[in-house]
Amino acid sequence: MNWSWFSRRGALAQIGVMGAAAVGTGGMGTFNRDGDAKPVKRLYDFSEPEDNLKAVIKLNGSLEAEDVPHWYVGTIYGMVDGKAPLPLFDLEGSEISYCIPQDDGSYHVHMSTISYFRDYKTRKILTTFENPYTGKTNEVQPNLIEANGRYYDYSVNGIRINVIKDAIPDEPLLLKWTEIGDHTLLQGERSYPPGLPFGESQHTHCPTAELHDPDRSKVTNAFGTPTYFAPWPAWMEMTGQPGRVVWAVTARKFESVTDYPKEFLGLLEKNHPDRLTANPSA
């Protein structure tokens, strides 16, 4: 098996800003917390795998085949045992999902992802980085995810990348749905092939009424906060050195890429216009 996809160029394929990429479909039901929630007729029963699958797609993508953009910002921290976390640089990015329903009830989810790295203090786009661990100056490039026929296979048996599907157990992962006030929160963990030093915890939340609205194909007002654990990025030239990085990100789902911040959208339109859609037929 070729694991080269889990490399620098595949970093955000692993971070999975779209929360559904981080969870399976073995829901445990809803944990209700005290709050002033308005009565909502439930469309989904989270104890049912099929309802979990549809709810995850609706929350993080769309039940229809259409581009669903997510914009995100965050900070990447260096972690070395025995030392305090060190904020290295910020990031800003876009991940667009395109969910295609299949005849068997599953979904093929295609993604288009790009991240720009920014200076932690000034938040200017980084072209070079003064590495505090090595003293070297590293060249920085936007992080692109190459599709090349890859997509996520979403089914009641879990969520797995198609090209390494056989390396990930076909068993549902635990989903934790929590209702508080008028919002529903989803917690889950990404599944990786055994032996890879990656991990991710994903939290996403949205209005409960939108999630259970039968007339909606997607939740529009959704926010996610993934936390991703990974080895040093290859461009930092620290392979083999002790430690790791932690990506702390906040993401927002939008109706259209035209809703992105103007400066960021301008960067995409000028430098990477091919990243403005995830439609595999485009």
Image: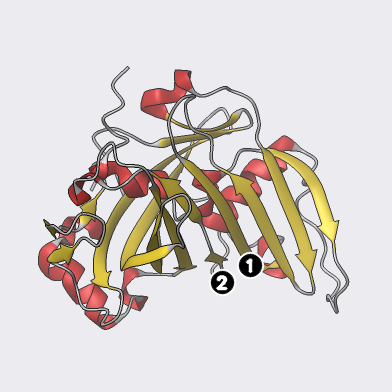
Label drawn at residue 73: none
Q: Residue at x 45, y 39 (%)?
A: 198
Image vertical order of residue 8 relative to residue 257, above or below: above
Residue drawn at (42%, 49%) of the image: 15
Camera-nearest residue between 77 and 193 = 77
Dot 2 amino acid type: Asn
User: Is 230 or 13 nearer to us in this picture?
Assistant: 230
Question: Where is residue 142 drawn, in percent x and y?
Answer: 19, 58
- Position of residue 120 measured from the top left corner of the image (x, y, whole percent): 31, 74
Q: Quadrant of residue 205?
A: bottom right
Give the left or right position of residue 187, taking residue 22 as reference: right
Q: Earlier in the sequence, mark 1 or mark 2?
A: 1
| Neighbour tally class for label 2: few under 14, some 14-19, many 20 plus, Cα within 10 Å | some
> Crowding at label 1, few (<14), some or many (≥20) Cα neighbours within 10 Å?
many
The mark found on residue 206 in the picture is: 1
Per the image, label 2 sits on a secondary structure element best described as loop
Q: Amino acid at mark 1?
A: Cys
Residue 178 at x, y percent in the picture: 76, 59
Residue at 79% x, 74% y: name it: 181
Q: CA distance from mark 1 to mark 2?
A: 6 Å
Q: How is the image coloured?
A: secondary structure
User: Looking at the picture, does residue 100 appear above or below residue 34?
Assistant: above
Q: Are marks 1 and 2 in contact (CB under 8 Å)?
A: yes
- The residue lying at 86 percent from left, 72 percent from top is 39
- Above or below, 187 against 209 in this view is above
State whether residue 7 appears in this view: yes
Q: Which mark is residue 221?
A: 2
Residue 62 visible in the current orientation: no
Front residue (pair 68, 188): 188
In the displayed structure, does residue 154 sit left or right of residue 129?
right
